[in-house]
Image (cartoon, grey):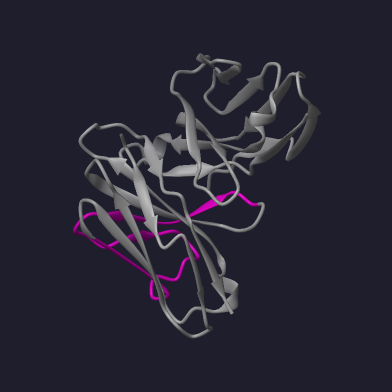
Amino acid sequence: GAVVSQHPSRVICKSGTSVKIECRSLDFQATTMFWYRQFPKKSLMLMATSNEGSKATYEQGVEKDKFLINHASLTLSTLTVTSAHPEDSSFYICSARDGLRGTDTQYFGPGTRLTVL
Amino acid sequence: TQLLEQSPQFLSIQEGENLTVYCNSSSVFSSLQWYRQEPGEGPVLLVTVVTGGEVKKLKRLTFQFGDARKDSSLHITAAQTGDTGLYLCAGAGVWDFGNEKLTFGTGTRLTIIP
């Protein structure tokens, strides 16, 4: 159990376009989802925390107007990178917390590799 | 801002050898987790330690949480090539209790040579 999926797994886009990444909890209800960014050979950096039905909380230095997060249901959160630029190229990973189990455990998705040309 | 420093950053050893990875911070954490990440994939949870001084074993992997809940170690006995990967520690701060925000360590890239 506790499977999290991401779509797409890889995306290549032109500079200036917007890209939407989906994160789904497949077998549990995720009251909270998290979005991370990982540069090559680096660790994960938390971008934002998303609670179902409310606005996301962004970490310091993360532009909320550039990285739009929507958590409209208990099983789906989306991250939209608006007007993407080459410096936005990165590995984006989501995680989800099972609210019903009441634990702090986060279940991670497989990641989305974004390349902006 | 909580910082978690892992050491060593890179480690390359022969199959069959033992190794220890350290995760240190000046902050106190309510719990600490260890993950392993393969290239192009998300992190996979190995263990969660909650109590100061706690020791958990997962086959050849032994995890310890420091008494003060500021540091942790991962010891691998008789390393195998399948242990190769990026090992990440992640701490949930006591001030984040209820928010379950994780701060990830700097990572240790382990390579086991056959």
Let me know if residue B24 appears in the view.
yes
Q: Residue at x 48, y 37 (%)?
A: B44
Please, which residue is most extreme toward the bottom here?
A16
Q: Residue A21's spot in the image, x, y percent?
A: 38, 65
Q: Is residue A59 magenta?
A: yes
Residue lying at 60% horizontally and 48% vertically, measured from the top left? B39
Q: Position of residue B107 (x, y in %)?
A: 64, 41
Q: Is residue A117 above or below residue A101?
A: below
Residue A27 falls inside the magenta stretch: no
Q: Residue furthest front?
A: B114
Q: Is residue A39 left or right of residue A65?
A: right
Magenta-drawn segment? A42-71
Q: Residue B102 is drawn in which quadrant?
A: top left
Q: Quadrant of residue B110?
A: top right
| Residue B28 appearing in the image | no
Horizontal and vertical percent for residue A16?
49, 85
Q: Nearer the viewer, residue A20 or B5?
A: A20
Residue B30 shown left or right of residue A1 in the figure: right
Residue B99, percent from left and from top: 33, 43
Number of numbered callouts drawn: 0
Q: Which quadrant holds residue A7?
A: bottom left
The residue shown at (60%, 35%) is B25
| Quarter containing the N terminus of chain A | top left
Image height of B15 relative to A22, above or below: above
With B57 as the anchor, is A105 left or right in this view? left
For the C terminus of chain A, the quadrant is bottom right
Nearer-the-camera pick, A93 or B54:
A93
Q: Classify A18 as above or below A92.
A: below
